[in-house]
Structures are given as structure tokens and as C-alpha cells.
Image (cartoon, rainbow, N blue to C red):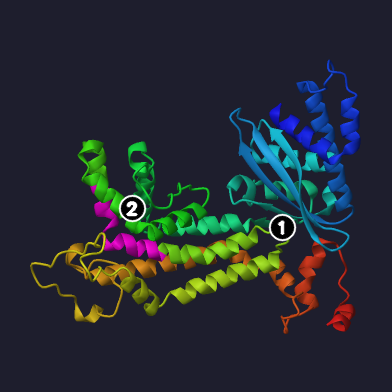
Amino acid sequence: MGLFLSLFEYTMRKDPELTRITKTIPQNARYTSPQIQNEILEMMSKLVTEEIVRQVGDSWYSIKVVGTRDPLSQENISVVVRFVDKNYGLCERLLVMATSEKSDAEALTGVITDELTSAGLSTDKILSQVYDGASLMSGRHGGVQKLLQNKLDRNIPYIHCFNHQLHLVVIHAMSSEAAVDDFFGVCNMLYNFIRKPTVAILYKGDTLKRLLNQRWTGHLATVKVVVKSFHDISTLLTEVENTRGLGAEVRVEATGLLRAITQRSFLFIAHLVMKLLSLFEPPNRLLQAEDMDLFTAVTLVNSASDCVKTMRAENEFSALWDLCAPPASATEAVPVTDPGPSKRRRTINENLRGFAVEETVGQPQSDIDEKTEFMRLFYSVVDAVQGEMNARFGERSSELIGALAALNPEAEDNFLDPSKVTPLLVLAGTDVVESEYTVAR
């Protein structure tokens, strides 16, 4: 009721005629009952849908579909259409929000086609389909993308959402190393600890972010706060540790967290993760733009991948290693803890010097040189990210991506090459006339 009335009042401020009519409405008939509200909202929704369909016209369009389950166990399905308007501008519109009691691939496929047809769009004009990577949507044999192609009896390319793929790259790569996984575990414990009312009142630094498996940007935000407010966090933990009035349980938890974050490995991983995730922040933000196109998206991903490759260098590791070195002065707030001197001399096989050893070499793990272990961790994480990038964006080498690349004037060798552009034309049922391409080129 409140939201509807606010919208109604806003509309009256924008429409003088409606304001005049409202003044003549008798007080015993305000037309704001739930039934009237639903009728008005339905009419507004119908008008918006009709306008979107009018804008699409006879153009080809792509569909983007996302489903979420509500507390009533119904599947809420948002259907977005993406098309080029008459002024050759990219448009993206939320066409409809539908519901389904069933959440299997066949039911979702039926909902998508029924809603498009009901809205007035021809399913013959679907050019591509974009979903997340869940098997329900992306399955090659029984997923929505395959069932939709079978139902319409033609090839409709499926594109896995690039933002979702970036998320999977980060989550899977970051969890490939137990040390990094433990690092985020400590960050999550810090978040919960600082939220305690008796502790929060003492904290002066930036607010830590909650880690969500569904959004990797929260991991980057958390790491940035940890690095920026490390002094404030360590000072807080020290103060809590020495304050008897806060209780033994809170003080013991503060002691454990203080010991964890003052290890050199904690800061090293924090800076490493922050640098890697920062490489994905610009493409992640740009990929969400309405006017983003597939070819530009591929270019952004390639650039991010190249940056990760560049990071795999000894000088990059050395910079991070020096950044996390123990403080030179004892007056600094909280020193980073280094392991004490060994009681016996450590030796490593001469044949292994200069290499990052990923397995034990006969002696206990604690006897392995610390810097060598950090170097192994560094290369392992960078390689995991690069491997995930290569695996999840393999579609970059597909025929469709090659066809889009051939439309780029900077592609001197393949620009307007009929053999390269053909896959794109086949989708739209357009004949290839090689002479036209020769003249255009």
C-alpha cells in the first residue's frame, strides 16, 4: 500500500491532468483498495510490455533468463530481451517476471517460450540465449539451452554469462590452495568478531564486508579493508585481548585472531589476492554495461588473462615478499611474526635450488625454506587463476567469436572474410555473397 501510494503521488506531481482529476474524487471512493491497485499495476505492466515489443519490432533479439526460488517454493523467472533498436543502439529490457511451480528444464523452457509468445514476440527471431552455468540451464543434452533449440528446431547459440564465469574463476581458483581458503576463513571470523556489540564500539577502521559465495566482489572488498585497516584491526584485537571486562571467551577469540593475522603468510596472501582480484574488477564492472557486446567482452577477458600471465614473474613475487617483510622498527603497532630460528641447520638438495618445490623432499614440511614455500604458493595461485580462465572462456575460439572478430576493421587478415563471417550469417538465414564482401573490404 505504501509503495503504491508513493508511486501514485509521484505520478500526480508529474501529470497536472491527473492531479486535477484526483481533486474531484469523492472522499468515500479513493480507488486505493488492493483490488484496484492490482488492476492498475497490471495495466501498467501491460503498457510497458507492449512498448518493449514495439521497440523490438521485427528485429532479432537475444534472451537472458535467470531463475530464483522464493519462500513459497515457486520459481521466479526473469526474462530479459536484448536487441538493436531502429537507431542501431543496443537495448536491454526486462520483458516479464514469470513464476513456475516446477523448476525442471522442460518446465522452464515452456515458460520462456510461452511468455515470449504471450508478449507478442516471435520465437523465430531469437538469435542467442544467455544463462548461468548451472547444468539445469547449460546442460548439453537436457539443459534449457538444448531443449529450447530442440523445441524451435534450429541452432540458437548459448553464451555462458561472462560475469558468472569470472565469479567461478575466482571462487574455484581461490579455493584450490588450502592456505588461501584458510585466509578467507580468518577474514570471515574477523567479520563476525567485529560485529559483536561490545567489540564494534571499540573498532575505528573501515567496515569489513560479509563474504558471499555468490559474489566474489565481496572477497575483494574484504581484502581491501583488511589491507587498508590492518593497523586498526590489530590494535582492536590487542585492546580486546587486554581488557578483562569483555569476558574470557571474547579475549581468547581476540588472542587467536591476533596471532593469525600477524603471521607473515596472512599479509602475503592478502596482498596477493588483492592484486589478482583487482585485475578482474574493471572487466567485471564493464561487462555489466547495457551496451556491452560479445566481441568487446571477449577482448576484456583476454586483457585480464594477459595481465594474469604478466603477473607470473619473479619480480612480482619479490615485490609482494618485500611488502610483507617484518617491520624494521619495534615501535610499529603490531609486528608481523616470523618463525624463530631453527635449532639445527636447514639444508636443501643442491639440485633443487632455484626451483619452487611443490612436494616434500624427504624432510618435514617445517624444514622447507619459508621463502620457497611462499614462492610455491604464489605460483600455484596465479597458475590456478590462469588455468580457470583458459578452461571457462574456451568459447573464445568458437566460430561465432571468430565471426564477430572478422567484423572488426583492425583484424587486417580476416576483416570481412566471407568464410569467417558465414557462421554469423547462417544464424540470421542470410545468404553469403562473396563479391559484396570483396567490395566492402
Three-letter amino acid code at disc 1? Glu
Could you tell whether 95 is left or right of 57 in the image? left
269 part of magenta stretch: yes
Q: Secondary structure at mark 2?
A: helix
- The span picked out in magenta is 255-272
Q: Secondary structure at mark 1?
A: loop
Q: Secondary structure of the magenta portion, mostly?
A: helix
C-alpha span from label 1 to label 2: 39 Å
Could you tell whether 225 is left or right of 438 in the image? left
In percent of width and height, residue 434 lies at: 86, 78
366 part of magenta stretch: no
Which residue matches tag 2?
233
Mark identifier at residue 161: none
Could you tell whether 426 is left or right of 272 in the image? right
Quadrant of the image occupied by residue 160? bottom right
Quarter that holds the C terminus: bottom right
Mark identifier at residue 290: 1
In percent of width and height, residue 285 lies at: 60, 60
* Residues packed near mark 1 inside 10 Å, few (<14), some (14 to 19) or many (20 plus): few
Say which label, 1 or 2, has the lower sequence index. Answer: 2
Q: Residue at x 83, y 56 (%)?
A: 60
Quadrant of the image occupied by residue 247? top left
Residue in front for this viewpoint, 429 or 22:
22
Could you tell whether 51 is left or right of 253 in the image? right
Residue in front for this viewpoint, 10 or 213:
10
In percent of width and height, residue 412 lies at: 73, 84
* Residues packed near mark 2 inside 10 Å, few (<14), some (14 to 19) or many (20 plus): many
Q: Residue at x 33, y 62 (%)?
A: 267
Residue in front for this viewpoint, 208 or 439:
208
Q: Is residue 240 visible?
A: yes
